[in-house]
Image: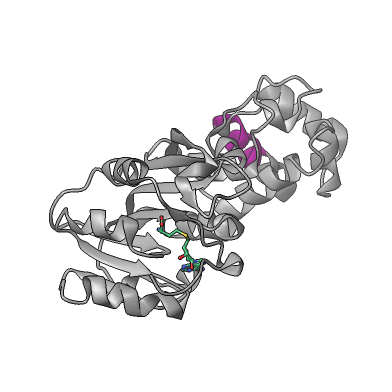
Amino acid sequence: MGTRPKKRFSQNFLADKNIARKMVELLELNPGERVMEIGSGRGTLTELIAEYKVNLATFEIDHQLIDNLNKKFGANSRVTIVNEDFLGVNPDEYFEGAFKLIGNIPYDITSPLLDWIIRHRDRIDRAVLTTQRELGERIASGPGSRNWAPISVFCQCHFDVKIELTISPKAFYPPPKVNSCTLSFSPHEGYRISDWDNFEGVVRGAFFHRRKQLVNNLAQLGGMAKEEIKGILSELGLNENVRAEAVSIQEFIKLAEKIKTAKSS
Ligand code: SAH
């Protein structure tokens, strides 16, 4: 197997074949489809994905793992092994059109990776990601939950996110300190957001101090008086004491539009 697992690359390799198989099944692959894998590691998922006769580009940052991967998959013309940081990858260099995404991903890159996914949302057919359980629960949570956060809003604007599996540390070698879970992302067309930057600013602002009322957080963004914001909330049928935790995506969208109009008038 070559080198020892490295902490700095969050190398926790899947040791449980059943879980690996379930993860790949969740990707719902058909022959000929295009797949990107984040963090090939020792090739556990790679091998199972390749069985579906898809076109696979698999990315591994640790050059010491590449020899072994080349030995395993070098003869398979459908598998491309790339020694690069996935976060810098431009999908256009590998595939035209839509692709699926899978990874048992290092915890420390989850946030930038979700940004990557949102940036490339129009190309992503489906994604299956295993991550730290707490973070997974946050991403998949809904309004009214204490986990509801900007990251949940942004992901769920474009994808239905579901917790598919919860995984104990024992399934990995070496075992991580925390539990993990596998999420599926399926794209939906549910929302129309005309000005993403404005929307993102309002949502981030709304959650700035989680315990504060929405009106106080939004007033801090500047440009609007509290009374004016309260007026907008009541137009939307929201209580003036509401906190961001209770606000749905549809309500955030309307809120962002009304704030934009109010500020520009
Ligand atoms: N998919 C394998 C490996 C999981 S461990 C399995 O399930 O067993 C996570 C892997 O991601 C490690 O091999 C690590 O070296 C790699 N990795 C970490 N950061 C990365 C990055 N930014 N880009 C690509 N690979 C990365």
x and y percent of residue 156 in the render? 49, 39
Above or below residue 211? Residue 15 is below
Q: Does residue 110 belong to the magenta stretch?
A: no
Q: Magenta part mainly helix, strand or loop?
A: helix
Query: Does residue 192 appear anywhere in the picture?
Result: no
Of residue 33 and residue 227, the one placed in the foreground of this image is 33
* Residue at 17% over, 68% down: 78
Find the magenta span and give its range.
250-258
Could you tell whether 107 is left or right of 91 in the image? right
Could you tell whether 142 is left or right of 79 in the image? right
x and y percent of residue 109 in the render? 57, 60
Of residue 9 and residue 109, the one placed in the foreground of this image is 9
Q: Quadrant of residue 47?
A: bottom left
Of residue 158 and residue 226, the one placed in the foreground of this image is 158
x and y percent of residue 73 in the render? 23, 71
- The quarter of the rendered structure image containing the N terminus is bottom left
* Residue at 17% over, 55% down: 51
Q: Quadrant of residue 80?
A: bottom left
Tag count = 0
Above or below residue 127? Residue 241 is above
* Residue at 33% over, 46% down: 17
Q: Quadrant of residue 108?
A: bottom right
Query: Does residue 186 appear anywhere in the picture?
Result: yes
Could you tell whether 120 is left or right of 106 in the image? left
Look at the image and name its color scheme. one colour
